[in-house]
């Protein structure tokens, strides 16, 4: 799931040398090292890694550490760095987000997704644009450029919170689908606002028509290119069963659609989103084996993790150097404007959809966080752009507020609204499993103590007999749950089979190292195992 960056044009005088490349790689390794340490901590604490990365970035930025200061200065001032990161990460991130999104999820939820991604994004843009112009007293260009930056949403943190809580899968699909498509709409609005808006304003009514035509050109052009590249990529893997080669083709599809779109002056973001959806769904159906799907998903999971980790850390580092002195009034008003704009957009665009509960609308509204796409677009503004500093200050401030305040409090709102999908029988099952685990752990501990003569045989038997009574009761409760809810048992058996297959996979590798079986047999058997794992999913 990705939000992410926009391709910046390279200045004709820019030169990309071996020294530039080495500097970029050093800064990337520094950022990646910090990101991995923080993300590992977040993983163990079972919290979204984006939030602590932003916080650590803020802290490191304020500590004035020489090596971190050097990275921060390089990130901020090096056009080469921004071009390098942006041009590499954006197509891969968008591709990763579309590759694993089943088309039927979009089809089943097309009404709310389109309502939010198109209607909601345009409403957000208009409300924030006019409010910013009149309340912040900035120029129309600055106001609507800022509005375009605040139109896309970034659900990365929210979806990471949703998954362990058991929020309804349909809400996940709506939020992810909206985010995916409002990327493209938001980027188009950004281009129009920052480059063409002044010209169209001078044209009056005719300018509105020209702006609308340009919007359609960007959107439809990107759609057509995405369809063509996605279809070509899909049929090219139809008769290929080699996952490294298919991963290489996917890279061509994602980068090719994006770069071609940007080159012919249409939306590269929309192009890669459409190409990715077609390649992942149609191409996945006609040309990807289970082994290929597992490997291609893993490949892009790594790319997405690296990109998102670095960008969220960069957000924290960047915000720490922005001068907000004397601008707190603007910042607070801008945050309120963005919150109001999002609220108006969500409730207005979904008002006609009666099947969407009010509680869902509240979460979709509150979960419309701003993220790395907004940051990257703001930084891509040329330094000669009038009002660039104001836009960057406001954008970074809203993103930080969005990630840290809304991101940290949405869990409480979800619990308060009671929209958790987990049913009572799931909680009962987890309770029984926890009790079973406790009893078995107790018996195992007492057995070890008896062997070490720390517990007499009689005391051991007395304790075990009591615990066995509990075990009997827990097993009866488990059997009753299996009888009432067979899907629990099916899931349990599926997990057991999957775990067994993973162990088989690794044990076969040991046989090769002992020269019991050949490499060719290993590869064939491991491929069979991966296909069985895929069939269990």
Image (spheres, helix red, strand yellow):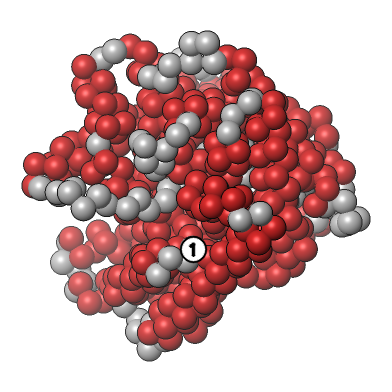
Q: Position of residue 433 (x, y in %)?
A: 67, 40
Instruction: In the displayed orientation, state which residue is furthest to the left.
Output: 18
Q: Quadrant of residue 30?
A: top left
Q: Position of residue 477 (x, y in %)?
A: 79, 43
The reply, left or right, for residue 327 in relation to residue 229 is right
The reply, left or right, for residue 515 in relation to residue 8 is left
* Residue in the foreground of this view, choosing between 499 and 66: 66
Residue beneath the point at 70% across and 70% down: 107
In the rendered image, the quadrant that contains the C terminus is bottom right
Is residue 216 visible in the rendered image? The answer is yes
> From what the image shows, is residue 412 above or below residue 515?
above
The reply, left or right, for residue 13 in relation to residue 347 is left
How many neighbours does mark 1 have within 10 angstroms: few (below 14), some (14-19), or many (20 or more)? many
Q: Position of residue 310 (x, y in %)?
A: 36, 38
Q: Quadrant of residue 95?
A: bottom left
Q: Position of residue 403 (x, y in %)?
A: 57, 30
> From what the image shows, is residue 374 above or below residue 109?
above
Question: According to the image, label 1 marks what residue?
Answer: 267
Residue beneath the point at 67% across and 50% down: 121
Residue beneath the point at 39% across and 58% down: 92
Q: Secondary structure at mark 1?
A: loop
Instruction: In the displayed orientation, state which residue is furthest to the bottom.
Output: 239
């Amino acid at each position: 799931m990705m939000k992410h960056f926009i391709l910046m044009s390279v200045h004709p005088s820019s030169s990309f040398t071996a020294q530039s490349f080495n500097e970029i790689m050093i800064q990337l390794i520094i950022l990646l090292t910090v990101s991995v340490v923080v993300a590992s901590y977040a993983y163990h604490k079972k919290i979204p890694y984006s939030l602590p990365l932003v916080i650590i970035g803020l802290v490191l930025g304020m500590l004035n550490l020489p090596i971190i200061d050097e990275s921060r200065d390089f990130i901020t001032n090096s056009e080469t760095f921004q071009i390098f990161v942006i041009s590499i990460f954006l197509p891969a991130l968008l591709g990763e987000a579309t590759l694993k999104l089943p088309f039927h999820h979009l089809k089943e939820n097309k009404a709310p997704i389109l309502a939010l991604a198109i209607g909601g994004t345009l409403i957000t843009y208009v409300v924030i644009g006019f409010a910013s112009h009149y309340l912040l007293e900035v120029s129309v260009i600055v106001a609507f450029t800022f509005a375009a930056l605040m139109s896309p949403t970034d659900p990365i943190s929210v979806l990471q919170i949703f998954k362990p809580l058991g929020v309804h899968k349909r809400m996940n699909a709506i939020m992810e689908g909206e985010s995916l498509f409002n990327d493209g709409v938001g980027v188009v609005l950004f281009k129009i606002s920052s480059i063409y808006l002044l010209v169209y304003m001078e044209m009056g009514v005719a300018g509105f028509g020209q702006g609308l035509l340009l919007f359609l050109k960007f959107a439809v052009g990107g759609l057509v290119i995405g369809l063509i590249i996605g279809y070509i990529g899909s049929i090219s893997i139809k008769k290929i069963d080699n996952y490294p080669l298919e991963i290489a083709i996917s890279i061509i599809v994602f980068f090719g659609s994006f770069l071609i779109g940007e080159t012919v002056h249409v939306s590269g973001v929309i192009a890669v989103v459409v190409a990715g959806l077609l390649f992942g769904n149609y191409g996945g159906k006609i040309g990807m084996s289970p082994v290929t799907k597992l490997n291609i998903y893993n490949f892009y999971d790594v790319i997405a993790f690296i990109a998102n980790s670095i960008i969220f850390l960069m957000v924290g580092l960047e915000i720490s150097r922005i001068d907000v002195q004397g601008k707190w009034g603007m910042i607070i008003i801008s945050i309120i404007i963005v919150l109001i704009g999002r609220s108006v957009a969500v409730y207005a665009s979904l008002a006609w959809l009666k099947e969407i509960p009010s509680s869902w609308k509240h979460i979709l509204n509150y979960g419309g966080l701003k993220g790395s796409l907004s940051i990257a677009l703001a930084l891509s503004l040329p330094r000669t752009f009038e009002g660039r500093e104001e836009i960057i200050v406001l954008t970074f401030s809203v993103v930080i507020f969005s990630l840290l305040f809304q991101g940290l409090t949405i869990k409480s709102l979800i619990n308060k609204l009671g929209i958790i999908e987990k049913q009572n029988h799931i909680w009962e099952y987890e309770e029984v499993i926890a009790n079973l685990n406790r009893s078995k752990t107790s018996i195992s501990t007492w057995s070890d103590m008896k062997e070490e003569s720390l517990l007499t045989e009689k005391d051991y038997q007395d304790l075990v007999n009591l615990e066995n009574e509990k075990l009997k009761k827990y097993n009866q409760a488990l059997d009753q749950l299996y009888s009432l809810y067979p899907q629990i048992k099916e899931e349990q058996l599926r997990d057991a089979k999957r775990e067994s297959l993973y162990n088989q996979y690794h044990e076969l590798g040991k046989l090769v190292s002992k020269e019991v079986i050949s490499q060719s047999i290993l590869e064939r058997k491991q491929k069979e195992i991966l296909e069985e794992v895929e069939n269990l999913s």
